[in-house]
Structures are given as structure tokens and as C-alpha cells.
Amino acid sequence: MITLGIIGVVAAMTLPTLIYNYDKQVVVTRLQKFYSSMNQAIKMAELEYGDKSLWFENISSSADNTDALKKEWFEKYLAPHLNIIKTKQIDGITTYYLSDGSAFKTNGNNRDWIFFPGDPEKCIEFGKNNIDNYSGRCAWIFFMSADSKGFETFAFNWDGSMDNLKTNSGYGCNKKQGWRPYCSRWIQMNGWKIPDDYPVKVRYR
């Protein structure tokens, strides 16, 4: 009985760590897969429509900057090359669900994209109930433009240093920031692994 009790205590102490390590692995696996899938979709679209500089649309300044316009553009050029299983309107924005349980949406202009490795509604609700938002926890930011190399982890105004990914006052991946778009670039630069000194606990469920 004493032995069983010790085993139970050890299991209770180690199980949360094992579960969290699994969750981290799911997050980074889906982040990397999404990054790869979007870049492949761009390449396929370029075979049909030419270089993306010819068909990419930044509609942030458009008088008709509506979800319908973004949806029309995305579903013409990129959606045919992605394994999308359903779409849903969340807070007035079309959100696309992938077969691995992840989802994504554009953040208003076709340049910034928000990726959710799990249920986007749970993630958004979590953000509403927490001061530090959901960015870098259950949602990650990506970027695309006509002159970018492809579909990239967010690095706007990044100076190229690893330290700046953590400390940047506007976009840095740290506890002080409510919005942490550099977290996706930091994970990518770390070999698609959650760094040991990552500032917040990630989640996908």
C-alpha cells in the first residue's frame, strides 16, 4: 500500500508536466504545418495567377474593407489549395477550420493572419477574460504582403536580434505585452519549439 501511495504521488506530480509537454508539441506541430501549408498554397496560386505581387490585395485602406471582400479574395486564390473542412462567422469575421483541429482568419487586411492551433472560440473567450489577451498563448500571428518572401511569421519592425523578439515595446513576446505578435517568429527561430524561457503558458484546448 505504501508503494502504491508513493506511485500515486509521483504520478500526480509528473502528470501535469507530461500533459503540458504534449500540448506544447501539438501547438508547435500545428504552427509549423500551417506555415508550410500556406506557403504551398501561395506557390500553387502563383502557378495559376502569376507572382503574388500581381494578385495579392492589401485591403486595409479600401472603402469596401469588408469580410465579404476578404473572403472573396481568399477563396479565389488560396482556399482551393488548403484542406478547409468548414467556415464559421466569429465576431463578424469568417474563420476557416482545418482538418487537424486548427483554424485561422485574416486580421482585417489580408496581411495579418491569426492562427489558432485549437478551438478559436475558446481561445477568443479566454482572451476576453484575461488581461494579457490570447496572443502567444492560444493564437499566433503571421504576415503576408505582395513583396514578402511568402507567408511569414510576424516580424514587422523586427531588428533581427533574438533579444528584440522578447523585448520590443510594441510587439515583443513577453509578459508585459497584451499583444505578442513576435511570439510566432521566436518559436520559428527556435527550431519550431517553445523556448525554455517562453513567457506564458501555451494552450490549444
Image (spheres, rainbow, N blue to C red):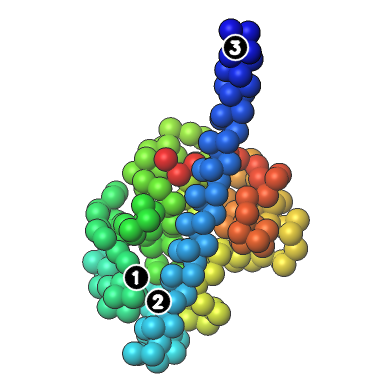
65 sits to left or right of 156: left
> How busy is the neighbourhood of tag 2: few (under 14 within 10 Å), some, or many (20 plus)?
some
Q: Confirm or deny contact between disc 2 and disc 1 (CB under 8 A).
A: yes
Dot 3 amino acid type: Gly
Dot 1 amino acid type: Leu
> Above or below — where is 114 with respect to 14?
below
Query: Residue 66 placed where, x, y %?
Result: 28, 65
Query: Residue 56 placed where, x, y %?
Result: 40, 80
Q: Secondary structure at mark 1?
A: loop
Q: Label 2, on which residue?
A: 41
Q: Secondary structure at mark 3?
A: helix
89 sits to left or right of 28: left
Res 5 label: 3
> Above or below — where is 173 with respect to 188?
above
> How busy is the neighbourhood of tag 1: few (under 14 within 10 Å), some, or many (20 plus)?
some
How much space separates mark 3 and mark 1, taking CA atoms?
50 Å
Query: Residue 17 placed where, x, y %?
Result: 60, 33
Q: Secondary structure at mark 2?
A: helix
Decide which of tag 3 and tag 1 comes sooner along the chain: 3
Res 82 label: 1
> Above or below — where is 101 with respect to 83?
above
Using the rendered image of the protein, determine whether residue 66 is visible from the camera's viewpoint: no
Residue depicted at x 24% and y 54%? 88
> Above or below — where is 109 with respect to 49?
above
Decide which of tag 2 and tag 1 comes sooner along the chain: 2
> How busy is the neighbourhood of tag 3: few (under 14 within 10 Å), some, or many (20 plus)?
few
Decide which of tag 2 and tag 3 comes sooner along the chain: 3
